[in-house]
């Protein structure tokens, strides 16, 4: 038995896990929007107050939509080279989907109690946990090339690891920071924007190069 031929427990098709994942991501995004409503029969003054009150929910929805969309995109990139999954990958994948499905809860906390330290800390912890799960999946699939239709190119894998590690670091640091300043913790999240821009551009370039070399 060589390094590319291993006995796999509970192995199955990566396509089935991706199909399940797409459904969970779609449901989570839908649930995010359920709280964005206005009472019926409001007079003009009441409408203005209700519209003002609902705006934090809209902003929280927009933020979580971006977060979930980023993880969905990353999830598909991780499994791009994967043909089969084993028990470890399935368990990690299901854990990640559970964390995604839970996102409406910290989103509601952020929308309704966004000025409280606990709410910002819970939201930050939830995103950090999702990032850590996706990081673990990336490393495991990188180190198990026998699961793939092709080996994940090392430069691509390293860039993905750096991207996810930055996400985990930023949101993990925001957890204790939230107890010092909830607003400061939310501002700290924006540190990730230039990092993701850099790693995203590098990732596109590396994937294009890998496709050309494999063509």
Image (tube, rainbow, N blue to C red):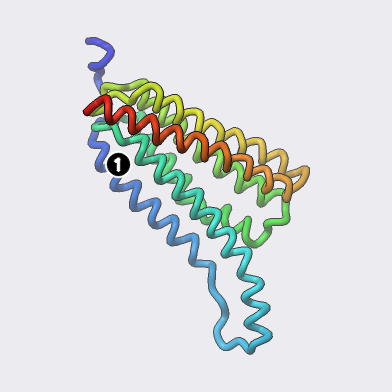
User: Against 56, is 48 above or below?
Assistant: below
- Taking 66 as reference, is 57 left or right? right
Q: Residue furthest right?
A: 180
- Taking 88 as reference, is 128 left or right? right
> SS of the residue at dot 1?
helix
Q: Nearer the viewer, residue 157 or 113?
A: 157
Q: Residue at x 41, y 31 (%)?
A: 137
Q: Position of residue 89 (x, y in %)?
A: 35, 31
Q: Residue at x 60, y 48 (%)?
A: 123
Image quarter in which the C terminus is found = top left
Q: Position of residue 129 (x, y in %)?
A: 53, 38
Asked whether residue 72 is in view, the answer is: yes
Asked whether residue 147 is in view, the answer is: no
Image quadrant in which you'd find residue 126: top right
User: Against 101, is 12 above or below?
Assistant: above
Q: Nearer the viewer, residue 155 or 164?
A: 155
Image quadrant in which you'd find residue 194: top right
Q: Position of residue 139 (x, y in %)?
A: 42, 25
Image quarter in which the N terminus is found = top left
Residue highlighted by disc 1: 17
Q: Position of residue 151 (x, y in %)?
A: 29, 23
Q: Nearer the viewer, residue 192 or 180?
A: 192
Q: How many marks?
A: 1
């Amino acid at each position: 038995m060589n390094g590319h031929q291993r006995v796999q427990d509970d192995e199955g098709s990566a396509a089935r896990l991706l199909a399940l994942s797409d459904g969970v991501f779609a449901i989570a995004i839908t649930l995010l929007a359920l709280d964005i409503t206005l009472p019926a029969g409001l007079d003009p003054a009441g409408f203005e107050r209700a519209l003002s009150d609902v705006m934090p929910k809209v902003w929280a929805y927009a933020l979580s939509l971006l977060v979930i969309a980023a993880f969905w995109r990353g999830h598909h990139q991780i499994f791009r080279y994967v043909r089969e999954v084993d028990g470890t990958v399935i368990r990690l994948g299901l854990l990640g989907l559970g964390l995604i499905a839970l996102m409406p809860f910290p989103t509601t906390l952020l929308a309704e109690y966004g000025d409280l330290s606990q709410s910002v800390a819970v939201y930050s912890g939830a995103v950090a946990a999702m990032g850590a799960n996706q990081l673990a999946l990336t490393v495991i699939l990188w180190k198990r090339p026998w699961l793939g239709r092709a080996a994940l190119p090392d430069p691509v894998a390293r860039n993905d690891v750096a991207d996810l590690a930055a996400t985990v670091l930023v949101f993990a640091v925001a957890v204790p920071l939230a107890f010092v300043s909830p607003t400061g913790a939310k501002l700290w999240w924006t540190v990730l924007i230039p990092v993701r821009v850099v790693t995203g551009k590098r990732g596109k370039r590396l994937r294009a190069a890998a496709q050309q070399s494999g063509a």
